[in-house]
Image: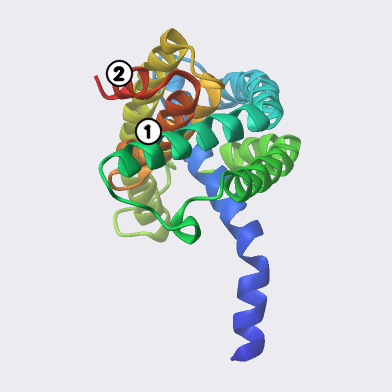
Amino acid sequence: LAIIAGALRTGAPVVNLVLLYLLIAATLSPLPVLLSKRGLGRGTAIGITVLLAILGGTALIMVLVRSLSRLSENLPQYQSALAGLVDGLGQKLAARGMEVDEALKPDPARIMGRVGQLVRGALNLVGYGLLALVLIVLFLIELPLFRGGDAGPGSPRQRLDEAMRLVRRFVGLNGLIGGVIALVDFGITLLLGTDAPALWAVIAFLFAFVPFGFLISMIPPFLITLLEQGIGQALLLFG
């Protein structure tokens, strides 16, 4: 059992990535079905979807790399802003007669060090972008997107088709909602001048599949806007 648990723990990152790519492929899967209903053949519908996935994925990878690199470059500025916030809060508390022990104060250098590790880890994940595109394309080709004509009632193929139809409906609806949330998030962060708006839009899309994901996805851009422009602008993210 210990060996099995160790193997599962070691392979968890790879399995998580594969499941993520399968989720993205399932989100895109309603598109070839829709195209086929417009009179296009199965191969043509999947080909158009694959082409759009490759073009969109390539553009997205380039934008994410640029956004993460910009965040990495601006970490010293965020550290200075965080140190200023901590000092300002300490001074306000001291003016009210409340002294905060130095051991309890947040360490901006340590916090930004952790953030830097996360950013570098995210850049490494984006480096797997080509593999992601290949896997998404393969999943799109292999997913049973169309009902088999010879699938009789109660047959394994008919049950699989029905299960995939329900999965496509659920994932497609969540993907649509996530896409709308991502666009709104991108527009707001862009208007406010928050760094890396495309990155926060992608995070908002992915967290649409998680309970309370919208609120969770708003935490990073809120903190970045807080450090860059102050609490007033940061609160505008929530309307």
Q: Residue at x 48, y 30 (%)?
A: 28
Sequence-earlier tag: 2 or 1:
1
Percent x, y for residue 142? 59, 43
- Please indicate whether residue 168 sits to the left or right of residue 53 in the image: left
| Residue 30 or residue 112, whichever sits in front | 112
On the image, numbered disc 1 is attached to which residue? 218
Kind of residue at disc 2 = Leu
Percent x, y for residue 130? 75, 35
On the image, numbered disc 2 is attached to which residue? 236
Q: Residue at x 45, y 18 (%)?
A: 229
Kind of residue at disc 1 = Met
Dot label at residue 4: none
Percent x, y for residue 176? 35, 27
SS for tag 1? Answer: loop
Give me the C-alpha separation between circle 2 and circle 1: 11 Å
SS for tag 2? Answer: helix
